[in-house]
Image (cartoon, rainbow, N blue to C red):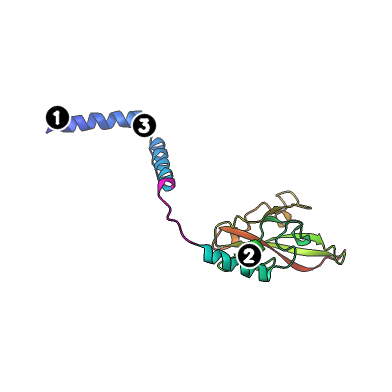
Amino acid sequence: MKWLDDLFERKTRKVAQQSSRRGALIRIGKLMVGTAFVLPVLPFDRTAQAAAGAARKAANAKPGDQDCEYWRYCAQDGYLCSCCGGSASTCPPGTEASKVAWIGTCRNPDDGKDYLISYNDCCGKTACGRCLCNTNERERPAYRMGVHNDINWCMSNDSTMFHCTLAAVVGVAEG
């Protein structure tokens, strides 16, 4: 039995000399990630849900709410919640507004007034993927966090998953 122990010892030492722990972890990680993409995903029939959602959206949407050119989206960076089951000022069901936000000042062309807009990310679900707006009007550098929109503002919530961004009118901006 000594010869078997010696054989395993030699082979183990040879593997240890030719590889590293990092290399082994990298290979294991690649295997795990590769496996995740190979696993089959079962199809789901969501046509009834989509039709009901489209009808609900059409009934609740205001003109312009789903258009990046809508005046209150002047500093928007993210998917419009009005395209994701919510509205311009409310998060979709199953998500919650971020506890922190960035602020923008947008001019309403209908009355010519400037309004303070609170841009809150809605958190708790994966990204919506519909109606991406990235207007960035009057965006400031990242070191002024309250006026910078490229940050995941869900960082202060229990779930840091970003879903969409709402644009709630806070009030009239005074000059």
Disc 3 is placed on an element classified as loop
Task: State the residue in front, 131 or 121.
Answer: 131
Would you identify the image quadrant in which residue 116 lies?
A: bottom right
Task: State the residue in front, 74 or 82.
Answer: 82
Please name the residue that numbered disc 2 is placed on: 99
User: Which stretch appears magenta?
Assistant: 37-45
Residue 136 place in picture, x, y as percent: 74, 52
Label 3 Cα neighbours within 10 Å, binned few <14 / some 14-19 / many ≥20:
few
Which circle marks residue 3 in the picture? 1
Which circle marks residue 19 in the picture? 3
Disc 1 is placed on an element classified as helix
Q: Which amino acid does label 3 sit on?
A: Ser
Q: Which amino acid does label 1 sit on?
A: Trp
Q: Is residue 66 visible?
A: yes
Q: Give the side of residue 89 with respect to residue 46, left or right.
A: right
Tell me which label, 2 or 1, sits earlier in the chain. 1
Residue 122 place in picture, x, y as percent: 61, 63
Label 1 Cα neighbours within 10 Å, binned few <14 / some 14-19 / many ≥20:
few
Instruction: Give the residue at x 81% y 65%.
Output: 115
Would you identify the image quadrant in which residue 125 lies?
A: bottom right
Residue 140 place in picture, x, y as percent: 76, 51
Q: Is the magenta stretch mostly helix, strand or loop?
A: loop
